[in-house]
Image (tube, coloured by chain):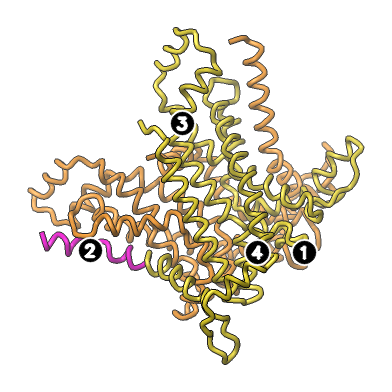
Chain colours: A yellow, B orange
Amino acid sequence: MRKESLQAWLLLLPALVLLVAFTHWPAATTIIDSFYTTPKGSRPPRFVGIENYADLMTDPVFWTALRNNAIYAVWTIPASVILALVMALAVNTAMPGRALVRMAYFTPTMLPMIAVANIWLFFYTPDYGLFDHILSWFGGGRHNWLGDRATALPAMIAVAVWKEAGFFMIFYLAALQAMPPDLKECAALEGSSRWNFFRRVTIPLLMPTTLFVLVNAVINAFRLVDHVVVMTRGGPDNATTLLLYYIYEAGFRFWDQALAATLTVVLLGLLGLLAWLQFGVLGKRVHYR
Amino acid sequence: MKVSTRFLEIIGAWMLAIIWVLPLLYALWTAFHPGEFATRFSLTAPLTLENFRNAWAAAPFARYFLNTTILVTLILVAQFIVCTPAAFAFARMEFAGRNVVFAIMLMQLMIMPDVLLVGNYRSMAKLGLVDTILAIALPYLGSAFGIFLLRQTFLTVPQQLDDAARLEGCTLLGRLWRVYVPLARPTYIAYGLVSVSYHWNNFLWPLVITNSVNTRPLTVGLSIFASTDQGIDWSIITAATLMTSAPLLVAFLLFQRQFVQSFMRAGIR
């Protein structure tokens, strides 16, 4: 038995070392760094307790980033998940050109977010862009979509939804195809309406998939900021600054290590809280087959 | 179900599909036509490859392609080598602390390296690895997702096969290599496709850790190309954008079924 234990640990070792070195270790050092000042030149970091957190509480950009990220998540997550379900239901039935339609939904997923951002940047361009073009047919005027505080964040949300919905569709499609067909026959015999069947049978059976998709959607809402870097750099006036983008700015544009570390700890805390909510609260209410 | 509602549903599905591909079609139009047609539609507009030629000449894209290829290959091979034995240990071996270590590992599913830019940058600086392709790859090699996925697959391998191999005198690594790995082939393909497309497209960490032509992957190269001194020549920027996404996109269109099934396989369970 002791020999097997040793063998197991040897098999685990490379993966465990890499995992701890580049996930747990940086998480730990970041927490420690958040209690110190940023080293400047020859001045070493100084322990300041929770001062960095106190500063953060009075940092208006932090609150803007938090608010933006909340709005961004509240719109992108439901929109992409519901669209994904609609898409899956659509291509799960026999219809002309089904393969083409499915391909159309899924293709944005294969593009790098950077490429997506470049393409959409062009659409949002005042005058020349696709959106102003379409508006001009209806007599609309020029609009600076990314330069206007009111439309910049919604513009980012649209990009994210376009990119993600097709990805989540795949998982719903897999779940729909795994559903036993006799359920549908039963419901038809009982004279159940389609809407009723959808609400009482399809939705509950899809709950495990929904949980999986939700976890991914939540993670992406906080992880994916590539389009912000390319399209707006957080502007105008921080209207599109998301948390991770602010971390990137603090860490690699202002080189403010203390601020970046403190922000990272807040983001980690937030992700942890969301994970607990999803698995602890929502997870209990999901019926697994 | 009435025929007319069904008809409306199909129209709806098609409308959504058209909205969804419109951005891509528009990008294709812009890239393959001369600049003056970038925002003007005309059936007589001449097709051209000039935009691609200009983009290719304006930045070291060949080098970026090479960097990304090296990066993606390095990550894929290392992930397979590192995750396979770990997954096997979790699936088929008894040892003290198994559940605790498994839980610690799974934490990475929620707290991904992408979020830990600052901490990882400091580690790379200490290791003297800043601006190397290895540094881009390192945080992703011990992949909790990969270990979890392979473990789930290894658990479905019949124990009798394992026992039979053991009776034949097969060593531990021999059994792993001859019994488990071949039976998990679909999972390896699935995981490989997910990994390659993820890292081909990854941007923020490579942006932070690289600062020279010789290490930059395509995504970072493209963002620099698009943001500097190109003015607003959308035709050339769009051509470059399509060019960098092309390998993955073409592979996807050719092997659509495998891709879709792989993403499903990687997600379900």
Label 2: how many Cα within 10 Å (few below 14, some 14–19, many 20+): many
User: Mark 2 or mark 4, which has the lower sequence index?
Assistant: 2
Question: Which chain's residue wears label 1?
Answer: B
Amino acid type, mark 1:
Gln
Which of the two marks, 2 or 4, is nearer to us in this view? 4
Amino acid type, mark 4:
Phe
Q: Which mark is residue A9?
A: 2
For image coordinates 64% across by 69% down, the residue present is A249
Q: CA distance from mark 2 to mark 4?
A: 43 Å
Give the structural element (helix, strand or loop) at label 3: loop
**Side (left or right) of B140 relative to B131:** left
Q: CA distance from mark 1 to mark 4?
A: 33 Å
User: Mark 2 or mark 3, which has the lower sequence index?
Assistant: 2
Give the structural element (helix, strand or loop) at label 2: helix
Q: Give how far across and how far down residue A143 sits, in percent.
A: 86, 48
User: Mark 3 or mark 4, which has the lower sequence index?
Assistant: 4
For image coordinates 53% across by 17% down, the residue present is A196
- Overall secondary structure of the magenta section: helix
Residue identifier under label 4: A62
Q: Quadrant of the N terminus of chain B?
A: top right
Q: CA distance from mark 2 to mark 3?
A: 38 Å
Which of the two marks, 2 or 1, is nearer to us in this view? 2
From the viewer's perspective, is residue B37 above or below residue B21?
Answer: below
Q: Give how far across and how far down residue A78 sits, in percent.
A: 59, 39
Residue identifier under label 1: B230
Q: Are marks 3 and 4 on the same chain?
A: yes
Q: CA distance from mark 1 to mark 3?
A: 48 Å
Question: Which chain's residue wears label 3?
Answer: A
Tell me which segment is drawn in magenta. Answer: A1-18
Give the structural element (helix, strand or loop) at label 4: helix
For image coordinates 81% across by 54% down, the residue present is A148
Question: Which chain's residue wears label 4?
Answer: A
